[in-house]
Amino acid sequence: MKKILFSVLPLVAFSATQVAAQTRTVSGRVTDRGTGQGLPGVTVLLKGTTNGVSTNSDGSYTLSVPASGGTLIFSSIGFIAMEQPIGTTAQVDASLSTDAKVLSEVVVTGYGGSQEVKDITGSVAQLKEEKILLQPVTSVDQAMQGRMAGVNVNTTSGTLGDQAAVRIRGANSISGSSQPLYVVDGVPINTNDQSNVLGSRYNPLTDINPNDIQSIDVLKDASAAAIYGSRAANGVIVITTKRGLQGKPKLSVNSFFGVQNAVRTPDVLNGADFTAISNEKAANARAGSSIETGAGRGIGNTGVPAIIAAPIDVNGDGIPDETNWINEIFRQGTQQNYQVALSGGTELASYYASADWNDQKGIITNNRLRRGSGRLNLDLTPKKWLKSGLSLSYSKTYNQGVNGENALAGATVSGYTAPSNIPAYNPDGTYYLNNLGNLGNGNNLIPGSFSPNAYFHIPGNLRENRNDNTSQRILGNGYLTVEPVKGLQLTSRYGIDYTNNFEDQYSSPILGGLGRQVGQGLVQNYTTTLTQFNWQNYANYDRTFAEKHTVGVSAGVEYQETKTKRIYSVANDFADNKFQSILDGLYSGILTGGGQEFANGFQSYFARASYSFDDRYYASFSVRADEASTFGVDNRRGYFPGGSVGWRISKESFMQGLSFLNDLKLRASYGSVGNSNGIGSYASRTLIGGGQYAEVNGFSISQVGNPALQWEKSNKLDIGLDASFLDSRVNMVFDYFNNDISGLLLFAPVLRTTGIPGASVSRNIGGMYNRGVELTLNTVNVRADNGFSWTSSINGTIIKNRVTELATPNDIISGVQRASVSRSLGVYFLPEWAGVNPENGNAQFFDKDGNIKQYDAAYTTNANATQGRWLTATGETTTPIGPADFKYQDKGGYPTFFGGFDNTFSFKGVELGVFLQYSGGNQIFNGYRQALLSTNFQNNIEEIKDRWTTPGQQTDIQKLVLRDPLSNQASTRWLERGDFLRIRQVSLGYNLPQSLVQRLGISNARVYGLVQNLYNFTSYSGLDPEVNTNRTSNIAYGTDGRSLPPPRSFTFGINLGI
Amino acid sequence: MIRNFISLRQAAVGAALLTTITSCDVVDQDPPAALTTAQAFANPDRIAKSAVGMYDQLQDANFMGGRALIYSDVRSDDTNPAPFFGGISTFTAIANDGTVTAAWTGGYRTLYGANFFLQQIEANTGKTSPALEAQYIGEAKFIRAVVYFQLVNLFAQPYNFTADASHLGVPLQLVAPDVTTAFDPSQNLPRSTVKQVYDQIEQDLLEAITALPETYTTSFDKTARATKDAARSLLSRVYLYKGQYADAARLAGEVITGGRHALNPSPATPFNATSYQTSESIFSVAMNTADNPNTNNALGQHYGRQRRADIIVTPYARIDTNQFRGKDRRRTLLLDPATFPATTTTNVFTLKYNNASFDYVPVVRYSETLLNRAEGLAQTNAGISTDAIALLNQVRNRSKPGYAPAFTATSFASKQALIDAILFERRLELAFEGHRYYDLMRYKRNSSRVNYGAPLAVLPIPLVDLQQNPNLVQNPGY
């Protein structure tokens, strides 16, 4: 970034003076000789004048020139400039070659450093503006999906405002966060979801307008990331926003509109089927075991009524009422986005300013997210030795959230399982409710005794209750750089990240829940402010000696402090249902308010040195010393070194004869980085906090501290090969990596009998590795003379993870998954399903020796209870299936291979893009199917009709016995392959011809349409294999717990340049 | 010359920038909402608050915040199955049942508070007055006894399951481990026998009786903090469970003769939000609107008709009206609806707890003390104890309708008939206070959904600890 700004000479001093006399117009298109694609931002200058323009996004331009003669100069950074006489034609095209000497692409490496792509000796992936801009996404994490080798992005949910799980070269932590560090315009930002006190969703990355992003650089290996030291173990994502360039002011207008629909929704039973299946569950419980042996002969649970479900006709139309709750909950979503950006600059100052408005309505009723944002990036160069600037953005996001998979009243919880044999509304249009404000019972028995929870009226909950949050965020930093002697730059940069998030929850008294229980409505408001300051002072020195020895040295110091403060207030008993806010005089009940506050800080020193000889041999080294408040007093400071070497083989004389080879470079890096993300601010301390006992104050211990606590460390090795062949039509990047993680920070579980608060103590013991290979291949497949071209980019990653050491004598357990030594993280540990016994419909499991045990669910010796019993395959009573019978499965919840395949076909201004994304090697625990085949008194999916009913029947669904606790227990029955190939995006764009555009008085216009998530090839039987309910968990990763799947969207958009 | 001048200025600006690299202390962060251990025991005032903190931990939402009582009652013949509580009420819990695991965890978490306090008060001895130090130690031991009494009854068969109570109880945790000891193999505690657990409870309560004050000055403290009478009453119950009836009668007698407690005129008074602190409530875990086990765990949420309404008490309401009279005030004032339910599918709820979250959790109530002594006397008397009948009448007459005659010696055909009447009165009077299921089991009687001695009549030892602690043994049948 900086390098561009400093090295660019004034290309065009634009002037209002137009050639007054006779003029004509020439137009044309400038392309990259290597790829055949249009080149934006190329300066087209009429030789000998100041008359010039820049090409627009597809490389085309239009310029007024004198009626005859003249020569055009085409120039752009990284390309060899060329001159082209105009002659008499109105069309002047140019095709520029890359200039190997001038940097063509740079990656930002942090603290004033940048590196030419060709000189990279670490491992850095880059995603550029073009690929981000063309996606209708609300946050940048979604834009990265499938685009870069080694970067796995799991969007996890179709609920608006959910954060994606980003894993760079695998999950690199067990207890800590595995999310990477995000650095925006040189300053780390906070990306922890601090908001969800009330369960609302808030993705901190939504606060950055994706259209403002120039490039995303992902630092994957240790040499690239070590400069970020203790925060770099999960990789670093460096986001650079757009800045103004010298030249004519540019105004761009982008807008898109789209519709979204659920790809799949559950097929739940209709009213008649629900009634029949429910009564069958009851009848089977009443009948008792069909195996007439033992004390239970002829005894059934007569405590269960014979009829628990019956139809009702509330509106009196003579037809039983019925509701398809799925239709009541889902809807067609829409998204509209408008953005205006303005940029330009002179030798002394440049600017970029933008504003955007985004309005997205989700596929669940009343789920809506609106964002407005503005940005100003300014750079001033008042003196040749002085440069200063700022990056400032403000955004406000209003998210009308919905209760999700973690709430009983969640749309995908009660909404999927509510009885279908009742109406949704009374004949007068009011909600059909019972006396508790829950879903009306119809002629069904109250679910209370037959299922764990009452049913909520979900459409009512979605409409009457509020689960909103409004976040406002200011991200800003300013810098001052002086260059006292040539090559030496001293920079001070101060950044702030201020977030104010207001959560606003309202529970209506009409509906069952808190708003009714505490009196006329309940409002809970939480305001969380997060203030982070970051101050960096560093010096960079870059010099080339004797033309061949290039040296770079940097050193600096950085401070950072993050303070979070939260206050909340609660009010109930409102004077009227219209009043739903905590405003004076409107309520009589006051529940307690309160707050929380915590802070943490970093203080660091860092240094970096690099040397290269003749673009042939490279070496670099960096080290960082971090001190963090979070860790134990004795272990606050850690040192993180990293280094790399590179060898451009193609520059050696012995390689010169190979004409097909354009470039070949071997590189290797090794280093140590740390992880401190996701750890509580006071993790090392024993905390004795407030311990109120009703109205008396006291002190209670809330955390047992560990004064020896320190960072987890990741030693990363990377060996890579970059090659370019066949006139640069084939470019390849290959990497082998090995992340060896030690001192894994574990919020280590202790025995519950210790009584320790949280049943855990933070410790540093445990190890793990992630090893794998990555390949990226960019190719120009077809470049025909008639202008047709086909380019593609394919990337793939194969990764292997193993846990090597744990603090605890046994596994760390999270749900049905584990961290277990010598197995991959998130391995499943489950009893093995042995199918349904065709003779009696019992569920069967294998014991540890491979013998079948069947669960006789309906068996009882007590007419008031259903007891159940375990039998051998031959019907002898036996011991239950227990943990001794559980087995580790081969696979865990993490994909072992993933990537993307992007194709672009272009012909005469028409561009077709097809982007495929793939992932696999993992297993998914299909908790969705498990929950919707439940034997509780609830609705089920159609599949339940395959249940066992008659002896001899071959099926995979056991005899249904009401409230059977064990047949549906977690087992391998619910594990499924998670492999998929998704047509993630198909886009069709058209650049309007220049002749037409010019008549409109603008410089370029592009229209496009695209489809996201068009089709998914998968054998997974749930709604979507990418659904991951445990977003923040590193162990229980890959469980489908009824999260909302990502929708399919159709979008139409327009880009205008003026 | 000019060039030089500019260079100097550049150098000056550069130097100014470098001097900004001054120290900026961000790595020393003091937690704004916490004290260190040393601070929390530094002076008499802070030690007093640390003592109060033990009760804060006793409010554990998954244990003495109410759930421990519920897990007795939902397994008894007084309630319908309540599937909200995992597999507990249906006797289908498995070893990794979340509700069971939370109860186990909550019990030991509460013990940590008492053990931690005992360790620290010993380490900081002399920092408060000897009298207060003794009282605080007594309170810690009382809390420990309350928790162990519940734990051993939830996770182990009753005392009389083996002749010498040598069957497995629960692990006895008497220290509060820190980071250095938490992972030590010495923490792999085995299950002590039921006798060993009861011995510990008895020892703690006897020491508490010595150390605790007879009473306090504020009405809050009188009910919400441990007193000698609270410890005596609980110990009398412990002796009943052990079958030491004379000791049970003696200790309950000491409370009664002390004269500090009396029954309210109405049986509903102790459950009314305005009168949780009458002398009838000898010890309750206090709650208020600001400090309670929240809306997912509070007693009122689970029992209240207008709340979560998880627990239906129709079987209790359907006790024959010849015994549980139609106009008994425990029916008319404490059941909703108060009328006898015509069918088993009519849903009846108790009115003992129906606030959103701040119902007190009754642990020791004077009517229990009276019935404890009655039972102790009835058991130890060779014939029919008239003293026992008088105590029984004292509890029964408060609630029975006028048309039902009071008991006299002639009301009972045998000593056993009197004992049965006392047990029946316990069922009516102490319903939903965590007694019924254990009262059945200690007399080797069956509950409606499970029989005495059945393996599944006790909860499973949670899988999470079983897998980590090689010395822990699972209950049979799980």
Image: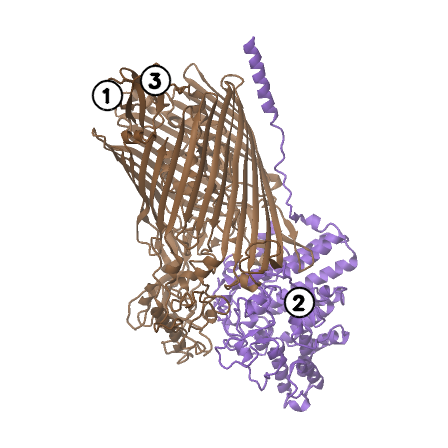
Tell me the chain of label 2. Answer: B
Marks 2 and 1: in contact by CB < 8 Å? no
Marks 3 and 1: in contact by CB < 8 Å? no
Name the spot of residue A33 as percent of width and height, x first.
28, 25
With respect to residue B221, does A745 lie above or below?
Answer: above
| Rendered colour, chain B | purple
Tell me the chain of label 1. Answer: A
Name the spot of residue A363 as percent of width and height, x first.
39, 52
With respect to residue A353, does A690 lie above or below?
Answer: below
**Which residue type carries mark 1?**
Thr
Residue lying at the far top of the rendered structure: B1
With respect to residue A453, does A690 lie above or below?
Answer: above
| Residue A132 in view (yes/no) | no
Q: Which residue is mark 2?
A: B284
| Label disc, if present, on residue A19 of the rendered structure | 3
**Taking A512 as reference, is A283 left or right?**
left
Most foreground residue, B270 or A802:
B270
Disc nearer the start of the sequence (1/3): 3
Q: Are marks 1 and 2 on the same chain?
A: no
| Label disc, if present, on residue A89 of the rendered structure | 1
Quick one: which chain is brown? Answer: A
Most foreground residue, A552 or A316:
A316
Number of numbered discs overlaid on the protein picture: 3
Q: Nearer the viewer, mark 1 or mark 3?
A: 3
**Taking A979 as reference, is B58 left or right?**
right
